Amino acid sequence: MPAYDYQCKKCGKVEEFLHSIKDAPVYKCPDCKKVMVRLITLNRTGFIMKGGTPAINYREKQLRLKKREKLAKKEKTRYGTGSSIQPNVAGMETDSWSDAQKVAKEAGMDTDSYTPYVEKEKKKKIKVV
Ligand SMILES: [Zn+2]
């Protein structure tokens, strides 16, 4: 019987359960009694079924989501409100976008979204000088 990892939705505890492929039992977290969800991994179960296994579908879905996210980011950059936005980090205003990016980086936030603004800022500065 293959082993499956289940993760608690609430506390994140991971437990391993053995059951047949056909079965889809519901396991409850031993700690907080919340329903656990199956973690789908290709390497753990070690087999690939033809015609799209849930594992593959899941991975494809994730990849597609990531692609969509990337596209959305690009669109934002291209058609975004651009210079009308004040430099800020999560609503907190900063002197410049490069400052905002610095603060975001220090806070462990995603700094990629600041890059286009920082680039724009740099170009502006060069023009002035
Ligand atoms: Zn739990």
Image: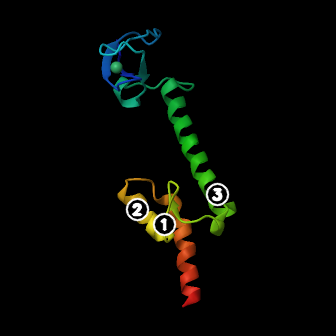
Image side of residue 76 versus residue 117, left or right: right
Q: Is residue 85 above or below residue 33?
A: below
The answer to which quarter of the image holds residue 86 is: bottom right
- The residue indicated by pointer 2 is 103
Which numbered mark, 1 or 2, is in the foreground of this view?
1
Between the residue at mark 2 and the residue at mark 3, the CA separation in whole angstroms equals: 21 Å
Q: Which residue is mark 3?
A: 76
Cα gap from disc 1 to disc 2, whole angstroms: 9 Å
Residue 73 at what x, y percent from top left?
A: 59, 54
Q: Of callouts 1 and 2, which one flags the residue occurring earlier in the amino acid sequence?
A: 1
Estimate the x, y position of residue 45 in percent, counting from the top left: 37, 23
Q: Where in the figure is residue 115, as x and y percent of width and height?
A: 51, 65
- Viewer-proximal residue among 48 and 57: 57
User: Amino acid under label 1?
Assistant: Thr
Classify mark 2: helix, strand or loop.
helix
Residue holding disc 1:
94
- Residue 114 screen position, x and y as percent: 51, 62
Residue drawn at x 46%, y 64% as measured from the top left: 100
Residue at point 32%, 24% (across, down)? 13
Of labels 2 and 3, earlier in sequence is 3
What residue sits 66% from the left and 57% below the top? 75
